Image: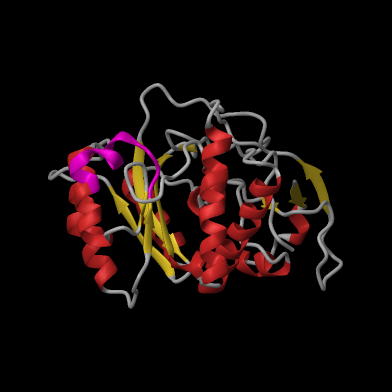
Amino acid sequence: MVLRLWPRYLDNPSHELLADKLSVGVLVSLKPQERWMHVKSAEAKTPHNDLICQVIYSQFGLAIHQNDHQARRRFVEWAQNGIAVVPDFHKRILFSDEAHFWLNGYVNKQNCRIWSEANPQVYVETPLHPEKQTVWCALWAGGIIGPYCFKNDEGHNVTVNGDRYRAMITNFFIPELNNHDVQELWFQQDGATCHTARATIDLLKDTYGDRLISRFGLVNWPPRSCDLTPLDYFLWGYVKSLVNADKPQTLDHLEDNIRRIIADIRPQMLEKVIENWTSRLDYIRASRGSHMPEIIIKM
């Protein structure tokens, strides 16, 4: 369910403060006058009684396949077994993803759409000649690596293919990862073709060995599982809620906003996002692999 926070209670410039009040860091509206927080229950139990909320619903745009539930159950069983052995196992997974940001405020990715601002049931049409920035990030409990914006040698925005994805892994991601004090992290990616080409998988195995959650990795990432990816259920929506506040007119301005917003995300928010991931595992196990009909956050 989604709680709509009415405008007069959103004057505080600290969006994270609101997130802290609700024990969640998810804000997914672009308009300054209305922001959406996704929580588990219809009423926010906070120390402050000045939050007035209205319940609405949102959903992911997914085409469910016959074997999805079984694949999701297998993954959830693997993840929960890992947490049973190592209690902070979920904090050792580095989730990765790309999203497209358009100058007109539209945001999406190939396998999962971000809902529209005013009504989560209504999708925004892609412009005919879009000006967009394709952004990649990796997120775990310890921080965010990125954003990385896909561009050619002339600095022009380009689509992602296998060669460009591998170049990003080699020239950006691995050097950035080496700057962090991390050990024994697992790496997750979805099943996009550029992610799962043989050369890409070989490159990732050179870095992570068997700690690869991906198609053709040791652990298979279940397809069409946007509700299990923190970048989908948190990061892209959060960035979308803020990135067009000053109505950027150029892609450089848009990119600057994306970088600033991501850099300002606090560690406490990421910790809550990753803790929420375990609640999602519980839900999917209880529902025998079903996709989540609503956004839930553990309160």
In the image, residue 48 sits, relative to residue 240, either above or below, namely below
Q: Residue at x 35, y 37 (%)?
A: 192
Q: Residue at x 60, y 48 (%)?
A: 28
Q: Residue at x 26, y 45 (%)?
A: 150
Bounds of the magenta segment: 189-201
In the image, residue 224 sits, relative to residue 271, either above or below, namely above
Asked whether 119 falls inside the magenta stretch, the response is no
Q: Is residue 33 left or right of residue 253?
A: right
In the image, residue 283 sits, relative to residue 141, either above or below, namely above
How did the renderer colour the structure? secondary structure
Q: Is residue 77 left or right of residue 187?
A: right
Q: Residue furthest top?
A: 128
Query: Residue 101 appears at what percent x and percent y?
Result: 42, 41
Residue 212 appears in the picture as rendered: yes
Q: Residue furthest left?
A: 153
Q: Nearer the viewer, residue 157 or 201?
A: 201
Query: Residue 265 appears at what percent x and percent y?
Result: 50, 66
Main secondary structure along the magenta-highlighted residues: helix
Q: Is residue 33 left or right of residue 52?
A: left
Q: Residue furthest right?
A: 49
Asked whether 196 falls inside the magenta stretch, the response is yes
Q: Residue at x 47, y 37 (%)?
A: 223
Q: Is residue 144 left or right of residue 206?
A: right
Q: How many tags in the picture?
A: 0
